[in-house]
Amino acid sequence: MFNKRGFVIALAATAAACLPVGKGIAAEKFPERTVSFVVPFPPGGPTDAMARVLAVELGKELGQSVIVENKAGAGGNIGAEFLERAKPDGYTIMFGTSGPLAINQSLYKKMSYDPRISFTPIMYVGYLPNILVVRENLDVKNVKELIALDKSSPNKLSFASSGNGASSHLAGVMFNELAGTTLMHVPYKGTGPALNDLLAGQVDMTFTDILTAMPYIKANRVRALGVATARRSTAMPDIPSIAEQGLKGYDVSVFFGVVAPKGMPGDRVQILNQAFAKALDSDNVKKAFAAQGLERGPDTSPAYLSRFIAAEVDRWRDVVKKSGVTLD
């Protein structure tokens, strides 16, 4: 349920997005040149891969080239700040995620933008579920057994993350809060090193995205205990959710949304929203996203993304506070 404050902020942001910026921008035919699709992370990761598939199909719908531009750093904040400074004409848009569009608002001490009011929402694309996996020789087969093992020997089990404040860290914080467990956090510099130590048996478990975990689960190198979202993943439907195993309300995933600079004319919002909707329905995007484990969102309207971002900022504020992590 969205709280009142978040709804008011979201409503204001949506209304602002529909106001014309200037007769010059609004009157021009759009688009007439290349569109820059900012990815606030390095090339090669899941966000970058999804953006590149989307960019091809979006270009077909718009009749112009759509070029992915990587602006990595500070957990996605560098790319978001770049977008904030861009002209609100529709030629610079961003493929944002939970970090720069929600979690970072509470995680970083210094933020030049507020994701609830600093951007024009275009579309909620979908989410990538996280999944709880344990080392292959840990003697537990489900979430209830894991909780029981932890409570029989408190402060013994460890979970790896890709870094302090990462979704894989906050997933463990939320798990401890709901389950009453004492899983110890071991931060790494990235998903790769964390997963390598899990495979080597140096740590007991990790909460990672389903795309990364899938090949190791299928090869029986790690054991999946539960999907970290409210419902099961369509990519691996035989794995129960953590919520259905007793942790009601447990929901941790990485969401993806398209945003533009604040104040973009409403007609351009509509053009881009419709183009993205058609791109998402293309066979190429459907096939690629299904292979990556991405789940489609329930609503593709700009208003939905605006409300969703406001709600996520509020939801993660308490989790970040409990984690005790702040970043510069």
Image: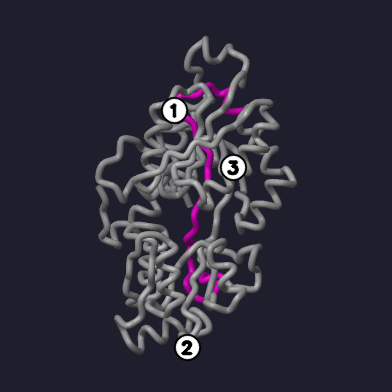
Q: Are marks 1 and 3 in contact (CB under 8 Å)?
A: no
Mark 2 vs mark 3: which is more N-terminal?
Answer: 3
Q: Give the residues in magenta.
A: 241-270
Q: Nearer the viewer, mark 2 or mark 1?
A: 2
Local secondary structure at mark 2 = loop
**Vertical position of residue 13 compared to residue 48: above or below:** above
Residue 90 x, y percent position in the rendering: 53, 25
| Closer to the camera in the image, 310 or 202 | 202
Q: Residue at x 54, y 75 (%)?
A: 224
Q: Is residue 82 left or right of residue 290?
A: left
Q: Nearer the viewer, mark 2 or mark 3?
A: 3
Q: Residue at x 58, y 25 (%)?
A: 34
The mark found on residue 262 in the picture is 1
Instruction: Tell me which amino acid carries mark 1.
Output: Lys
Residue 315 x, y percent position in the rendering: 40, 53
| Closer to the camera in the image, 193 or 252 | 193
Is residue 267 shown in magenta? Answer: yes
Q: Residue at x 48, y 13 (%)?
A: 22
**Vertical position of residue 48 compared to residue 292: above or below:** above
Mark 2 — residue? Answer: 139
**Vertical position of residue 7 compared to residue 295: above or below:** above
Mark 3 — residue? Answer: 52
Instruction: Tell me which amino acid carries mark 2.
Output: Asp
Mark 1 vs mark 3: which is more N-terminal?
Answer: 3
Residue 311 x, y percent position in the rendering: 44, 48
> Marks 2 and 3, how far apart in space?
41 Å
